[in-house]
Image (tube, coloured by chain):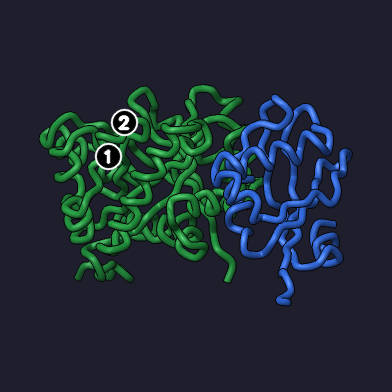
Amino acid sequence: MKRVKRRYLALLLDCERLPSEREFIDAVWASVTRLYGEVGASLTGLTLISLDVERKIAVIRISLVALSVVRASLAATTSLANSEASVHVLAVSGTLKALYSNVK
Amino acid sequence: MTRAFADLHLRVNPKDQKATQELIKRAAGFGYSLISISFTSGMQDDDLVRLKSVCTEEGIDFVSRADFHPRSENDLTHFLRKFRRRFEVICISCDNKEVARQAAKDRRVDLLNFPSLDYHKRFFDRAEAELASGSLAALEVDVKPLLILQGPSRVRILMSLRREINVAREFKVPIVVSSGVGEKRFMRFPRDLASLAYLFGLDEASALDAISTNPERIISRNREKLSKRFVAPGISIVKEGKAL
């Protein structure tokens, strides 16, 4: 079976009220679903790895083929947990180790 | 080579100094090298000088830009005669077909912009693109509607944009992607701005060109033309001799 290639994204949350992990990933799912529908969203393989509340940095894992889809959806996100927010992509990497070294 | 990113359409009232400064500071923090705030009729030359100095303090290059909504061809030519030599970038917002056609064939126009919310007034078709390809005009796309609209209205604007982008590529009309925003919360990192362009059919390389190479080319061309050394395209004064 062919191995699924993945990418890890470090995201900077620009918001006044910090969302919980659940609220954050739900907002990302909602944004992807609004733009690409449920089938499109199901192909992204979106998973939350971590959410650093102090630094407002979240790390997510997605499938490589859905990178453009997820990046566009993240850029189109304007609210998190019912408050105005934006999500910026800080770094993209193939491994968590490289991602964390890029973000430090 | 690293790209110099540009956002040529920040829509903030320069009279509101605090908001303007915050926006410029944020743009610098996001990694933009060139920004532009469009000149409005109420703006004075002093405002431009002040904006330039704020940008210099933040380490970014300010580009002077004038936006105009002409009602007729005469209105357009009158505006161009009056303002072309004062601004580095001229953008024409085309509200009717007559103006859109004239703006596309006039070599003094840099950017063609179309109303985002009324898709009946988006006149960038094959005829418009053919005229624009013969002149120097580029198609400007603001991404703000993609952030504020939802549902059917966003679908409609995406459909129009995708069609226009295909036409522009067919006729080799340069595309410039700008934010068109006036609020901090809608500002995006340059690469995030480029990723929004993916929604209307630009691949990664073209999207990055649309926020870096294409606007840079327009600015450097116009700065050369506006410099005192410019004589004609390809001819400039290198050194002035003494009169005998």
Residue under the image location 31 percent in, 31 percent down: B118
Quick one: which chain is blue? A
Indicate the chain on which mark 2 is placed. B
> Residue B23 location, x and y as percent?
59, 35
Quarter of the view holding residue B152: top left
Q: Along the line of sight, which residue is nearer the eye, B196 or B163?
A: B163
Please rate how many residues cluster around mark 1, counting C-alpha atoms within 10 Å: few if below 14, some from 14 to 19, many from 20: many
Please rate how many residues cluster around mark 2, counting C-alpha atoms within 10 Å: few if below 14, some from 14 to 19, many from 20: few
Residue located beneath label 2 in the image: B118
Q: Check whether the beta carbons of the residues at disc 2 and disc 1 lie within 8 A of each other.
A: yes
Tag 2, which secondary structure?
loop
Label tally: 2
Residue located beneath label 1 in the image: B122
**Residue B148 seen in the current view:** yes
Left or right of B240 on screen, residue B2:
right
Indicate the chain on which mark 1 is placed. B
